Image (spheres, helix red, strand yellow):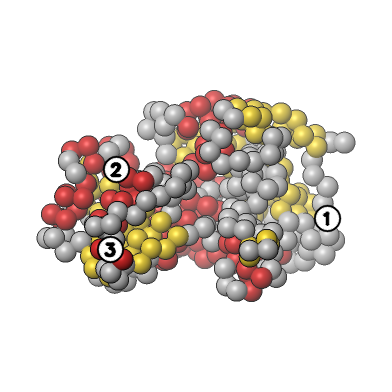
Amino acid sequence: MPKMKAAIFAEKGRIVLDDKPIPDVGPLDALIRITTTTICGTDVHILKGEYPVERGLTIGHEPVGVIEKLGASVTGYTEGQRVIAGAITPSGHSYACLCGCSSQDGPGTKHGFKAMGGWKFGNTIDGCQAEYVLVKDALANLSPIPEGLTDEQVLMCPDIMSTGFSGAERGGVKIGDTVVVFALGPIGLCAVAGAKLMGASSIIGVDTVPERLKVAKALGADHVVDFKAGDPVEQIMALTDGRGADVAIEALGTQGTFASALKVLRPGGTLSSLGVYSSDLGIPLGAFAAGLGDLTIVSTLCPGGKERMRRLMNIVSSGRIDLKPLVTHRFKLDDIEKAYDLFSNQRDGVLKVAITP
């Protein structure tokens, strides 16, 4: 049986490169030869044992590649065509999809569908930090890459761009809004860009890494707050003349950032949560106004599917956003263990790494 190289979860603290069989292609599937992929913060949660997956699973959920083989029932595509698929791969016909929440398209339980069910690559099925990945329900998920766009230009679309933008979308950002983004990693930076596109007139980014603060300004932040220079809540309230933010986007996944995002909201404001939390959250009584502040808390799992990917790539094609600066480091698949070491320890100003087989 033909083999391929793949980054697999071996045990807590170890993701290693190993050989695995190239997947067989079913009638509704497509086999994609990966040309570029990347490492996500969620993969680091897997590496650290904070999010459980099966040993031997291929990790990764951000594929850019070329169709190697199509299933017998997949029409409208050609082998050799450049495509992406979202990190979330809905079937299009599940209860979750038909309820309008395709990101939660996963196995049902007696209590309803399982949260995060739509995230399959590198979670419940083999992912794309490999030479090949099998895309199930290909008709719902493969999106052709427009002519003239490079792999790195569309590399953020499957997850980081879709997730960051959804933070602004789910937060209901409106023209003239003040938006605060807590944590300017790749997702937070995309949330800044998404808020700008949706019409926010004042965007405040919160972080402490100089390179991230600089990129945030380039992507549309009007102000940046260094949380090491003083209480970020006090700094934000001063910038808003005490009014607070219409929308606060939490993009880190810690109790501290969640509480701060709640504290800077105006009455009736919205906290849009993008972070992946690894422990229980507490809601500060005062910031929550004892439940009487007309506040809204929403959460988001990265929207996927081919139409979402088409729209995101159209934004890139239009020139309204340039996310190439987010790719700060490049590695071959053979060196992916080194890439994980760099990315998980956040050395050398890393934002995102491009992995090429």
Say above or below: 335 vs 153: above
Identity, as a three-letter code, of the amino acid under mark 1 = Gly
Q: Is residue 102 visible?
A: yes
Say above or below: 168 vs 159: below
Q: Which residue is mark 2?
A: 207
Which sits earlier in the primary sequence, circle 2 or circle 1? 1
Residue 354 vs residue 81, the one in the foreground: 354
Mark 3–mark 1 distance (CA, rounded to whole Å):
54 Å
Numbered circle sitting on residue 299: none
Q: Which residue is mark 3?
A: 290
**Label tally:** 3
Q: Quadrant of residue 290?
A: bottom left
Which sits earlier in the primary sequence, circle 3 or circle 1? 1
Residue under the point 55% across and 64% down: 308
Which sits earlier in the primary sequence, circle 2 or circle 3? 2
Would residue 133 appear left or right of 262 to someone viewing this image?
right
Q: Secondary structure at mark 3?
A: helix
Identity, as a three-letter code, of the amino acid under mark 2 = Asp
Q: Is residue 65 visible?
A: no
Mark 2–mark 3 distance (CA, rounded to whole Å):
28 Å
Q: Which residue is mark 1?
A: 26
Query: Are discs 3 and 1 less than 8 Å apart at CB?
Result: no
Query: Are discs 2 and 1 less than 8 Å apart at CB?
Result: no
Identity, as a three-letter code, of the amino acid under mark 3 = Ala
Give coordinates of residue 249: x percent, y percent. 35, 56
Q: Residues within 10 Å of mark 2 (few under 14, many from 20)?
A: many
Say above or below: 294 vs 277: below
Give coordinates of residue 97: x percent, y percent. 63, 69
